[in-house]
Image (spheres, helix red, strand yellow):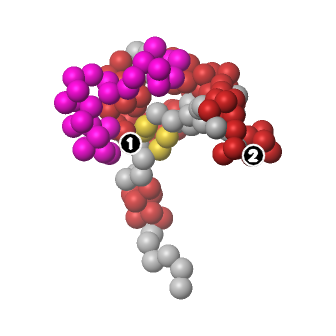
C-alpha cells in the first residue's frame, strides 16, 4: 500500500505538471516556480473575471445566477490586476518568457486551438473579450 515512487521520482513527475500564476504571481512565488520548472511549464492564470463577471452574469441572465453564489465567487478585479502586474514586472527583463507564460505555453497545450488562432492571422481574441492587461 502507498506510493511506490521515491521522493526524487515524485519530484521528477511534479516537474512535468503545468503551474498557473493565479494568485501566486508574486516575486518569491515566481522565483520558486522558476527554480522548480522551466518557464515553459508556467501558464498565465487569474481568478478573473471575479466580481466583474458576477455583475455581468446578473445583467446577462439573472435567472441563471443565485445571488449567494455570486457573492462568494473569486477575488476582486483589483486583486487579479495586482497579481497580473506582479507577473509582468517579474519578467520585464525577458519579453520572450513573459509572452510564453502569458500566451504561448497555454496554446502549446491545445494544438488544434493554436492552429485555428494562427489561421485567423491574429490573437483569435475579440477586443471585447480581452482582459485589461491585454488591451
Q: How many marks?
A: 2
Q: Which residue is mark 2?
A: 66
Q: Decide whether the magenta segment is chiefly helix, strand or loop.
A: helix
Q: Residue at x 31, y 45 (%)?
A: 110
Q: Position of residue 8 (x, y in %)?
A: 43, 62
Label 1 or label 2, whichever comes before in sequence order: 1
Whether residue 66 appears in magenta in the rendering, the answer is no
Q: Position of residue 116 (x, y in %)?
A: 24, 36
The residues tagged by marks 1 and 2 sit, at their Cα atoms, a distance apart of 36 Å
Q: Is residue 135 above or below residue 121?
A: above
Q: Is residue 36 above or below residue 14?
A: above
Q: Nearer the viewer, residue 97 or 9?
A: 97
Evaluate whether residue 87 shows in this view.
yes
Whether residue 133 appears in magenta in the rendering, the answer is yes
Question: Which image quadrant for residue 96?
Answer: top left
Q: Which of the numbered marks, if any, corresponds to residue 83?
A: none
Q: Secondary structure at mark 2?
A: loop
Classify 10 Å Cα crowding around label 2: few (below 14), some (14-19), many (20 and above): few
Q: Is residue 37 above or below residue 75?
A: below
Q: Residue at x 39, y 23 (%)?
A: 126
Q: Residue furthest left?
A: 119
Q: Residue at x 19, y 30 (%)?
A: 119
Q: Nearer the viewer, residue 115 or 35?
A: 115
Q: Nearer the viewer, residue 126 or 16?
A: 126
Q: Which of the numbered marks, if any, corresponds to residue 41?
A: 1
Evaluate whether residue 29 shows in this view.
no
Find the magenta span and give its range.
Answer: 107-135
Q: Is residue 61 above or below residue 99?
A: below
Q: Residue furthest bottom?
A: 1
Amino acid at each position: 500500500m502507498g506510493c511506490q515512487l521515491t521522493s526524487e521520482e515524485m519530484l521528477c513527475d511534479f516537474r512535468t505538471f503545468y503551474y498557473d500564476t493565479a494568485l501566486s504571481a508574486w516575486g518569491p512565488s515566481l522565483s520558486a516556480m522558476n527554480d522548480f520548472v522551466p518557464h515553459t511549464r508556467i501558464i498565465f492564470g487569474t481568478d478573473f473575471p471575479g466580481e466583474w463577471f458576477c455583475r455581468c452574469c446578473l445583467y446577462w441572465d439573472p435567472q441563471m445566477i443565485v445571488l449567494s453564489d455570486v457573492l462568494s465567487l473569486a477575488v476582486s478585479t483589483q486583486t487579479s490586476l495586482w497579481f497580473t502586474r506582479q507577473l509582468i514586472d517579474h519578467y520585464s527583463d525577458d519579453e520572450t518568457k513573459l509572452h510564453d507564460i502569458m500566451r504561448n505555453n497555454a496554446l502549446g497545450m491545445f494544438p488544434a486551438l493554436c492552429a485555428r488562432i494562427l489561421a485567423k492571422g491574429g490573437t483569435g481574441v475579440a477586443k471585447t473579450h480581452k482582459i485589461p492587461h491585454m488591451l
